[in-house]
Image (tube, helix red, strand yellow):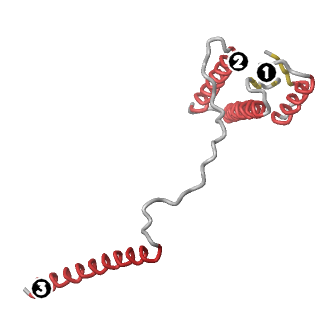
Amino acid sequence: MKEFFYVFERRKSWAALMVLVLAGLFGYGYYFAAVHGTVPTEAPKLPPVKEPAPLNIPREYSPNDSLLDLKIERDRERSREVEKIQELLDKVGLSDEVRKDAEKELWRLTQSSAKEHELENILSAKGFHETLVSISQKLVSIVVAKKLQQEEVRDIGQLAAEITAVNLEQIQIVEK
């Protein structure tokens, strides 16, 4: 019976503590209202938000868009090549030399894809919005969907040479 009263007494102390905490919160609220004149009920006013810059959203597909078709086909072909190499690497009992060559080719394809996208993005930022870049082992082909001036051709060639680390003689620039 003694234990029952002990537990009951502990519950009383918890209840008393909760009453004190609630009284303190209400007291603070009244104090805040008295000092500041009112209790804040809404968030402070923030400065207006500037309109975000337009996103570079890919354009919608059009059946007459041959450049987009070429990009899609390039990416499909690249995916097929990577898949074939992955299947080769997954085989058990592959010689070290063949495995090393396959890994090198996989790395080359990955790097080529990254450089193609990088060059396309930089050209888009420079105002050449519709471009296609294709990097093979011996040639970098760039298709631009607008008429180019001599200076623009030179700038595109130099940019491609810097990004892809190939000679200018290995860069082909085509106007669509």
Looking at marks 1 and 2 on the same chain, the residue that comes earlier in the sequence is marked by 2
Question: Which residue is more in the foreground, 31 or 148?
Answer: 31
Q: Which mark is residue 99?
A: none
Q: Is residue 93 left or right of residue 152?
A: left
Q: Position of residue 165 (x, y in %)?
A: 84, 35
Q: Is residue 121 left or right of residue 17?
A: right
Which residue corresponds to the image point at 67% horizontal and 36% vertical from the top-left? 96
- Circle 3 sits on which residue? 5
**Above/below status of 22 relative to 133:** below
- Circle 2 sits on which residue? 67
**Residue 8 falls in image quadrant:** bottom left
Q: Amino acid at mark 3?
A: Phe
- Few, some or many C-alpha atoms within 10 Å of disc 3 (few <14, some 14-19, many ≥20)? few
Q: Position of residue 42 (x, y in %)?
A: 45, 59
Kind of element beneath mark 2? helix
Question: Which residue is more in the foreground, 28 or 80?
Answer: 28
Kind of element beneath mark 3? helix
Measured Cα–Cα span from mark 2 to mark 3: 85 Å
Which residue corresponds to the image point at 80% horizontal and 22% vertical from the top-left? 141
Location of the N terminus (image quadrant):
bottom left
Looking at marks 2 and 3 on the same chain, the residue that comes earlier in the sequence is marked by 3
Which residue corresponds to the image point at 78% horizontal and 27% vertical from the top-left? 128
Measured Cα–Cα span from mark 3 to mark 1: 89 Å
- Circle 1 sits on which residue? 144
Q: Is residue 154 left or right of residue 45?
A: right
Whether residue 97 appears in this view of the structure is no
